[in-house]
């Protein structure tokens, strides 16, 4: 109902203003969260456990009163209003279906409690929703006799039957097995698009966040670390936390010291600083910086030959040319290391390499590459794949370019569909 | 011993296995249901007997001893109540009376059993429902609300549970007296509520704690206030706990003697069943037949209540009880 009245697709629908939530006993779950959602957007709140994402969601729902700050829906403050007066619906991680009520009663309960609709109208709406979700034949069953996926659908039904202005989903998929999770993820996404309802989706799973969100908001320590499209957060993480949190496997991070005289980063490895990196490192608060690179940035080479001998199957030659394109043949810095473990996942393999100088790196290679465990390899890391972060504050100083023309974009975005 | 039974059990199964198999085959052609059911059950009993270990036998022996220990007094009382006068202390002791007589029951009913039953029923119904009326919302609050002093208050509630009512019976009597509640059913019921509520709150809080909080959240989003949440959403999941509390309190209030005797005193019109039984104990001798008969009658309602509520323990109320709604 509310969605029908939208005049322009871009107007702000849900807004959080410097939301803060403290619990008695001095625990601050949410330090400060400000977010703005245009109508119909699906925003994912993602972060490790205890980052305040669920508390934020409960503040929007009205299940928790924020200590400070404001929640606005349609430009109107709803802080202090009871949940049912906020025109929201929520789906919980464990579904929270009423165990003694049938699916029909579960879905219809909210309508019965909050509206004066006659019973047959409630029943009609419940049946409509059940049809949308494909659970018409399950309406007489109790949650106990439904499978996880079916319970999930009933929970979704209970939320959408009330035609809410804002949809809140709290880790809705984490109780499902892997196959079902992928399917329900797509279904939820489709449902959200069809209903065009503003949605806040909470998850701790960054893969889920990347795939489902129009935008994602990365939370840590009760603060928003970054808000942006999944690709922005992946390629231009604003700080070290976002860099390590987004992406699977996560970004390799090496704490180094920038040696201005030598023009190199000293740490577990010594990495020659390109002009770009030197300039960026100068912005740091001190000499301490963190080098970061995605697992797909380095290439594995034969240590003896110093050239790329590890064959890639079914892949164009484009990737192999990347290094030379930037720093010239042999000019790309290379480190020696030993392969600990190879984890094949199909189209790719994750290779864990311990460098001679100490640190362990995760490197993604195409699935066809033949790499044996316990062999020595060369890890060639072009400076075009290196992020730079302030060693003290974690603030991002430099990102490699992405989404640009040529083979470079092909490489950097190539691994982002993980 | 047990080794022998094991060895004997195995050949039995194989020896009878063949004729049984033959029977089932024939049975399938003629009458499927009756013929197949019999042998398979028998087979299962045999294999299970064969699988018994020494430990199993020891455990079962323990069960039998324990059951005998608890059942024997009940049987003795039932047996004593059915004897004619004079047969009670006959020697040698016989559990089955030689001659059955209902004279003890007649005597007990003449002495006022109907009135005692009525009083006990009244006190129990009002007592138990009042206890539930207080402890269910209290347990809900303790489980779900965050308020200052919550932990301390819970501790105090537990502390009260530690105090035996018999120890504070004199001050209780004084309080009851000054409130004008002596020799009234209301006074007795109030005492029961006060004494039994702490334990009931603790027990019920445990049940509430097992129910996920998300259920409360879902209810609130569906438009329930706190009380509606309790009534529409949490009461059913917590019902097995309520059944447990109801049974415990029913047994207690039905059979409680000391407080009842103290509060009701000489007001014989209000006497409950436990006081009634006591009346057959005299200074110069106890009328054991009458005591036994009164005890049997006193036991029956409890057995009925327990059997009625036990169903909910076994099945789990959450699943089973909703067919009618």
Image: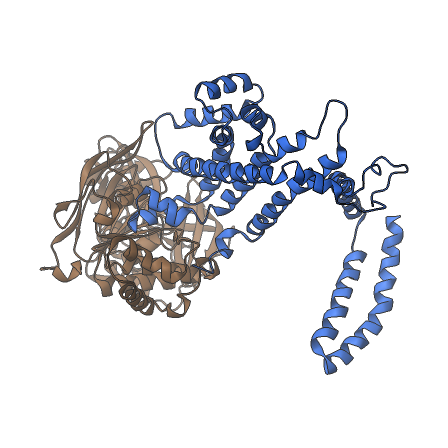
Chain colours: A brown, B blue
Residue found at the far bottom of this picture: B29
In the rendered image, the vertical position of residue A257 relative to residue B242, given as above or below: above
Quarter where residue A355 is shown: top left
Residue found at the far left of this picture: A7
Residue B311 seen in render: yes
Residue A333 seen in render: no
Closer-to-camera residue (A75/B233): B233
Closer-to-camera residue (B119/A271): B119
Classify residue A205 as left or right of residue A284. right
Closer-to-camera residue (A417/B47): B47
* Residue that appears at 80% across and 42% down: B83
Q: How many marks?
A: 0
* Residue that appears at 17% across and 60% down: A3
User: In which quadrant is the C terminus of chain B drawn?
Assistant: bottom left
Classify residue B55 as left or right of residue A23. right
| Image location of residue A62, percent across then percent down | 25, 43
| Image location of residue B321, percent across then percent down | 49, 55
In the rendered image, the vertical position of residue A75 relative to residue B147, given as above or below: below
* Residue that appears at 26% across and 31% down: A287
* Residue that appears at 76% across and 23% down: B284
| Image location of residue B157, percent across then percent down | 47, 26
Quarter where residue B291 is shown: top right
In the rendered image, the vertical position of residue A1 relative to residue A222, given as above or below: below
Residue found at the far front of this picture: B110
| Image location of residue B266, percent across then percent down | 58, 24
Classify residue B191 as left or right of residue A203. right
């Amino acid at each position: 109902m509310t969605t029908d009245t939208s005049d322009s697709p871009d107007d702000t629908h849900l807004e959080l203003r410097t939301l803060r939530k403290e619990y008695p006993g001095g625990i601050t779950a949410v330090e400060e969260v400000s977010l703005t959602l245009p109508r119909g957007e699906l925003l994912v709140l993602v972060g490790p456990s205890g980052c305040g994402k669920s508390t934020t969601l409960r503040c929007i729902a009205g299940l928790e009163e924020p200590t400070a700050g404001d929640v606005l829906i349609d430009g109107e403050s709803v802080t202090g209003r009871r949940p049912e007066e906020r025109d929201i619906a929520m789906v919980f991680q464990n579904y929270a279906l009423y165990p003694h009520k049938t699916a029909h009663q579960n879905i219809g309960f909210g309508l019965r409690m909050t509206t004066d609709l006659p019973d047959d109208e409630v029943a009609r709406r419940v049946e409509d929703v059940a049809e949308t979700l494909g659970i018409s034949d399950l309406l007489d069953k109790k949650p106990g006799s439904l499978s996880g996926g079916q319970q999930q659908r009933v929970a979704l039904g209970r939320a959408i039957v009330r035609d809410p202005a804002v949809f809140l989903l709290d880790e809705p998929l984490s109780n499902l097995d892997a196959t079902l999770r992928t399917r329900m993820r797509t279904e939820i996404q489709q449902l959200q698009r069809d209903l065009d309802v503003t949605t806040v989706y909470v998850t701790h799973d960054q893969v889920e966040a990347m795939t489902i969100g129009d935008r994602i908001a990365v939370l840590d320590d009760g603060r928003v670390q970054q808000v942006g499209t999944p690709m922005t957060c992946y390629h231009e993480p604003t700080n070290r936390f976002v860099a390590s949190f987004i992406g699977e496997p996560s970004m390799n991070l090496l704490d180094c010291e920038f040696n201005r005289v030598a023009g190199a980063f000293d740490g577990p490895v010594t990495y020659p600083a390109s002009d770009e990196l030197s300039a960026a490192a100068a912005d740091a608060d001190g000499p301490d910086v963190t080098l970061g690179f995605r697992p797909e940035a380095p290439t594995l080479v034969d240590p003896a030959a110093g050239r790329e001998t590890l064959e890639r199957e079914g892949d164009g030659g484009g990737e192999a040319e990347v290094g030379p394109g930037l720093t010239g043949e042999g000019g790309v810095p290379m480190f020696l290391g030993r392969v600990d473990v190879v984890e094949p996942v199909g189209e790719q393999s994750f290779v864990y390499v311990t460098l001679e100088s100490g640190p362990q790196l995760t490197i993604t290679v195409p699935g066809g590459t033949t790499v044996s465990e316990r062999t020595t390899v060369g890890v060639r890391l072009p400076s075009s794949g290196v992020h730079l972060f302030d060693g003290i504050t974690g603030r991002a100083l430099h990102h490699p370019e992405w989404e640009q023309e040529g083979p470079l974009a092909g490489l950097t975005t190539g691994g982002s569909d993980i | 011993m047990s080794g022998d039974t094991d060895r004997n059990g195995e050949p039995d199964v194989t020896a009878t296995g063949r004729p049984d198999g033959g029977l089932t085959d024939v049975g399938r052609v003629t009458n499927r249901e009756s013929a197949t059911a019999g042998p398979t059950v028998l087979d299962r009993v045999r294999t299970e007997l064969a699988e018994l270990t020494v430990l199993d036998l020891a455990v079962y022996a323990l069960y039998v001893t324990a059951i005998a220990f608890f059942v024997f007094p009940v049987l003795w009382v039932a047996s004593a109540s059915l004897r004619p006068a004079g047969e009670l202390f006959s020697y040698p002791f016989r559990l089955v009376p030689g001659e059955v007589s209902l004279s003890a029951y007649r005597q007990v009913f003449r002495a006022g059993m109907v009135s005692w039953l009525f009083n006990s029923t009244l006190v129990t119904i009002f007592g138990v429902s009042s206890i539930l009326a207080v402890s269910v919302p209290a347990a809900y609050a303790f489980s779900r609300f965050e308020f200052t002093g919550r932990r301390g208050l819970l501790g105090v509630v537990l502390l009260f549970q530690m105090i035996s009512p018999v120890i504070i019976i004199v001050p209780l009597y004084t309080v009851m007296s000054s409130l004008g509640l002596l020799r009234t059913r209301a006074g007795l019921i109030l005492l029961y509520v006060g004494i039994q509520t702490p334990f009931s709150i603790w027990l019920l809080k445990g049940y509430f704690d097992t129910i996920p909080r998300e259920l409360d959240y879902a209810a609130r989003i569906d438009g329930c206030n706190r009380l509606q949440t309790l009534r529409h959403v949490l009461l059913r999941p917590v019902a097995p706990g309520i059944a447990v509390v109801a049974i415990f309190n029913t047994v207690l209030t039905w059979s409680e003697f000391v407080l009842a005797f103290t509060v009701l005193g000489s007001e014989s019109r209000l006497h409950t069943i436990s006081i009634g039984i006591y009346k057959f104990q005299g200074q110069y001798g106890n009328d054991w037949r009458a005591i036994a008969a009164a005890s049997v009658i006193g036991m029956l309602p409890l057995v009925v209540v327990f059997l009625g509520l036990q169903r909910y323990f076994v099945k789990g109320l959450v699943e089973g009880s909703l067919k009618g709604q």
